[in-house]
Image (cartoon, rainbow, N blue to C red):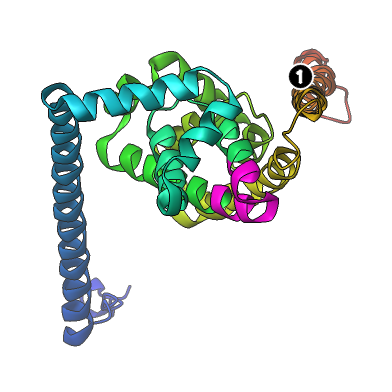
């Protein structure tokens, strides 16, 4: 018999040493990431304070300064009338400042979501010419959409729901869950749907700003061109024809949306139907008796 004391035991495997420089690099990277997060948090908090301060000052000015109160009420009444001629006359009344006023009006209606933007788009085309009006309407609408997105991203859901209403935000949330970025393209085709609801809701999602901005620009360009072109013909009896075309365009977009929703539901039903036989076959296979070959 051999003596167990003389048996050579295998040496324990040595763990590879971690270079000191690598550990220092990892620690430095983690510290840098923590600093970046802290900096981003401070910037967001600062932006939130600034936005809230601006909103508070605007509310105070509305209630404390009669001129501001009357002017805002006048603008809301003009949009509420849904009369393009009234909006056209209001823009023309500012003379050389008309372009700037129209730009600011588009941004204002973006903040006050229920006001329809397509009325201002029609008025811009009638006042400045169809292609000049299209450029003005498109660029100002982009600025307004970016502002809504920024407000929602900084202030959060609670503030957005107070601005637009919980029902509106929840409705758009459903579209974003189902269609993602396509929600922006679909909703922009419907002139009687406030696109500002979509801008606010997009700011509450994980969508990046540039993805939202590009999709917004692409989505609103066709509608802006169409409304501007027909807006340049808003004179006399042609107005009835133009409104008729707008209604047809809206119905076509609505039919497209309904058809897409219907097709998606049918695909889900077909997928569930195809999966059902497989789910039923699995327990049946388990219940089958074993054959001699299986044993």
Q: Quadrant of residue 34?
A: bottom left
- Dot 1 lies on which element? helix
Q: Quadrant of residue 187?
A: top right
What residue is at 83 percent from the left and 18 percent from the top? 273
The C terminus is located in which quarter?
top right
Name the magenta segment's main secondary structure.
helix
Q: Nearer the viewer, residue 287 or 164?
A: 164
According to the image, label 1 marks what residue? 279
Residue 117 image point, x, y percent: 54, 33
What residue is at 19 percent from the left and 43 percent from the top? 48
Question: Is residue 210 found left or right of 21 in the rendered image?
Answer: right
Residue stretch rendered in magenta on the structure = 124-137
Residue 275 image point, x, y percent: 79, 23
Q: Nearer the viewer, residue 220 or 95?
A: 95
Residue 208 image point, x, y percent: 45, 52
Residue 278 image point, x, y percent: 81, 22
Q: Nearer the viewer, residue 254 or 166?
A: 254
The N terminus is located in which quarter?
bottom left
Where is 167 relative to 99, above or below? above
């Amino acid at each position: 018999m051999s003596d167990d004391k003389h048996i050579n035991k295998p040496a324990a495997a040595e763990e590879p040493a971690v270079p000191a420089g690598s550990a220092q690099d990892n620690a430095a990277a983690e510290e840098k990431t923590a600093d970046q997060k802290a900096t981003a948090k401070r910037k967001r908090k600062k932006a939130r304070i600034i936005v809230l301060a601006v909103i508070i000052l605007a509310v105070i000015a509305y209630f404390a300064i009669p001129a501001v109160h009357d002017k805002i009420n006048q603008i809301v009444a003009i949009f509420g009338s849904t009369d393009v001629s009234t909006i056209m006359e209001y823009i023309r009344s500012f003379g050389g400042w008309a372009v700037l006023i129209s730009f600011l009006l588009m941004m204002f209606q973006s903040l006050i979501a229920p006001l329809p933007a397509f009325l201002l788009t029609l008025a811009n085309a009638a006042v400045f010419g169809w292609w000049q009006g299209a450029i003005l309407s498109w660029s100002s609408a982009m600025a307004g959409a970016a502002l809504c997105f920024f407000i929602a991203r900084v202030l959060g859901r609670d503030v957005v729901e107070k601005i637009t209403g919980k029902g509106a935000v929840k409705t758009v949330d459903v579209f974003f869950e189902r269609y993602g970025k396509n929600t922006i393209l679909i909703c922009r085709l419907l002139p009687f749907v406030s696109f500002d609801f979509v801008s606010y809701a997009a700011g509450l999602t994980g969508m990046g700003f540039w993805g939202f901005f590009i999709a917004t620009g692409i989505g609103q360009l066709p509608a802006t061109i169409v409304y501007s072109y027909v807006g340049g013909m808003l004179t006399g009896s042609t107005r009835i024809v133009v409104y008729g075309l707008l209604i047809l365009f809206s119905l076509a977009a609505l039919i497209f949306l309904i058809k897409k929703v219907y097709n998606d539901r049918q695909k889900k039903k077909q997928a569930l139907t195809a999966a059902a036989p497989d789910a039923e076959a699995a327990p049946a296979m388990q219940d089958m008796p074993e054959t001699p070959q299986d044993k």
